[in-house]
């Protein structure tokens, strides 16, 4: 696995921007629909607070939430490509951390644990499929498990 080339980055950026604009369009029309389904002239937040048992409406609001989450991930990925992100695009920051930690001697004088990660770059196949991926597959799973517990 290697660093994405300039051409790769350009391609991911184009894909991300397309996805971003189509998601933004979706969220707008879904929100309209969810609101139309309600008799009240209420905001989405307000509807969610009411804990309505209207399945369609709840489902729709769930979709909006997921899409907004995805939009955030896409925006962050574009920032990383532009060099304005929290880390370099294409790097799994958790692999990077693992490798860094393995280099440092442990505080108690014991030998550091060898890193499972051997490489900080997210595989190209994963980025082609999911250009806004923040982590490699292994760390993505760890993150999701942590979130479920929390
Ligand atoms: Zn990783």
Image: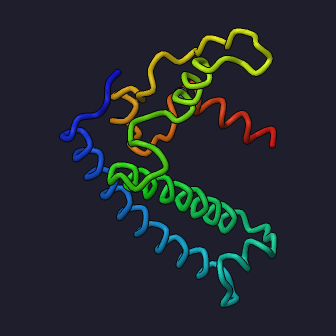
Which quarter of the figure has residue 124? top left
Describe the colour scheme in one phrase.
rainbow
On the image, the x and y values in percent for residue 122 come to: 42, 29
Lateral position of residue 126 relative to residue 3, left or right: right
Query: Residue shown at 32%/58% (left/top)?
Result: 17
Lateral position of residue 16 relative to residue 42, left or right: left
Q: Vertical placement of 2 versus 36: above or below?
A: above
Lateral position of residue 145 relative to residue 84, left or right: right
On the image, the x and y values in percent for residue 15 come to: 29, 50
Q: Between 77 and 17, which is closer to the camera in this rendering? A: 77
Q: Which quadrant: the N terminus?
A: top left
Q: Between 86 and 150, which is closer to the camera in this rendering? A: 86
On the image, the x and y values in percent for residue 55 come to: 71, 63
Q: Which quadrant: the C terminus?
A: top right
Q: Vertical placement of 1 versus 73: above or below?
A: above
Q: Vertical placement of 82 versus 11: above or below?
A: below
Which quarter of the figure has residue 103? top right
Q: Between 96 and 24, which is closer to the camera in this rendering? A: 96
């Amino acid at each position: 696995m290697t660093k994405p080339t300039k051409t790769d980055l350009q391609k991911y950026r184009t894909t991300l921007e397309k996805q971003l604009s189509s998601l933004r369009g979706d969220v707008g029309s879904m929100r309209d629909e969810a609101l139309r389904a309600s008799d009240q002239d209420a905001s989405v937040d307000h509807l969610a607070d009411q804990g309505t048992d209207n399945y369609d409406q709840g489902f729709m609001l769930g979709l909006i939430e997921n899409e907004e989450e995805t939009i955030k991930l896409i925006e962050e990925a574009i920032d990383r490509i532009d060099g304005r992100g929290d880390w370099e695009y294409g790097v799994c920051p958790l692999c990077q951390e693992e490798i860094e930690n393995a280099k440092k001697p442990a505080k108690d004088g014991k030998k550091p644990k060898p890193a499972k990660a051997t490489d900080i770059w997210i595989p190209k196949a994963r980025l082609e499929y999911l250009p806004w991926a923040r982590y490699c597959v292994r760390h993505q799973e760890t993150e999701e498990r942590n979130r479920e517990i929390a």
